[in-house]
Amino acid sequence: MRKRTAGVVAGLAAVLAALSGLVVLPALAGEQPASTDRPTAHWMKCAGGKPVRSGRFDEVLPPQAGFLNLGGTVTPCHQPGNGDDYAIVTFAGDRGTRGAAVIRGYLSNHPGNRIHTSLQIFPGIAAVCLSTRETGKYASSVRLDCVGIRYTAADDRAHRLPTVLGRIPVDAPVVRRGADLTFETIPTCPSCYQ
């Protein structure tokens, strides 16, 4: 009887969802839905399988309303197609956390290979990098440019804006760690990597 009731409830939910335009996927009682929203990237490959090596931030606007706006260029080595990606990577100052690499597609760039991105600022942010390959390991990732940022929990509580420290080396200690592909820009977010 319980299975039949669950089936009827699932059927009614599907009908109501269809009428309202929502999509509902049925699940059995107690079953956890499989996560299918893990991001994947397809890094552009240049001659010899090498990653893109041309790109930099050239505009870092003062943070406003919890967001940092960055502009720059990332120049593909051939005509980009669907699935040719690069990433914007954020790092917290706590070196025990991994970076968060948000995937961007070359086809979404503006004319002249211009990139414009807006990132949510979070207490503890220490750097933002432009990357053309993130492997999960620092040694095999390719970061083209990085910008240092200081924004502490005390700054957040006092409603102070983050301080943009300027360009930092791509091998600075704060960015010498792996990053995970994510839809989030907050490396300290526990649900970002699960």
Image (spheres, rainbow, N blue to C red):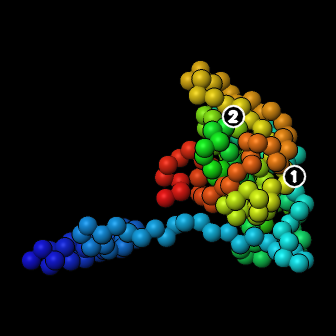
- Residue 168 x %, y %: 84, 41
* Residue 19 in view in this figure: no
Residue at the outermost top position: 158
Amino acid type assigned to the residue bearing label 1 in the image: Arg
Residue 34 left/right relative to 1: right
- Say which residue appears at 66% left-offset and 55% top-offset: 179
- Residue 50 x %, y %: 85, 72
Which of 99 and 24 lies nearest the eye of the viewer? 99
The CA distance from mark 2 to mark 1 is 22 Å
Task: Give the quarter of the image for residue 95.
Answer: top right
Mark 1 sits on what residue?
Answer: 56
- With respect to residue 123, does 135 lie above or below? below
Which of 132 and 116 lies nearest the eye of the viewer? 132
- Say which residue appears at 80% left-offset and 60% top-offset: 142
Task: Give the quarter of the image for residue 52.
Answer: bottom right
Disc 2 element: strand
- Say which residue appears at 74% left-offset and 49% top-offset: 176
Graded by Cα atoms within 10 Å as few (under 14), some (14 to 19) or many (20 or more), the crowding at tag 1 reads many
| Disc 2 versus disc 1: nearer the observer | 1
- Say which residue appears at 87% left-offset and 52% top-offset: 56
Mark 2 sits on what residue?
Answer: 64
Amino acid type assigned to the residue bearing label 2 in the image: Gln
* Label 2 or label 1, whichever comes before in sequence order: 1
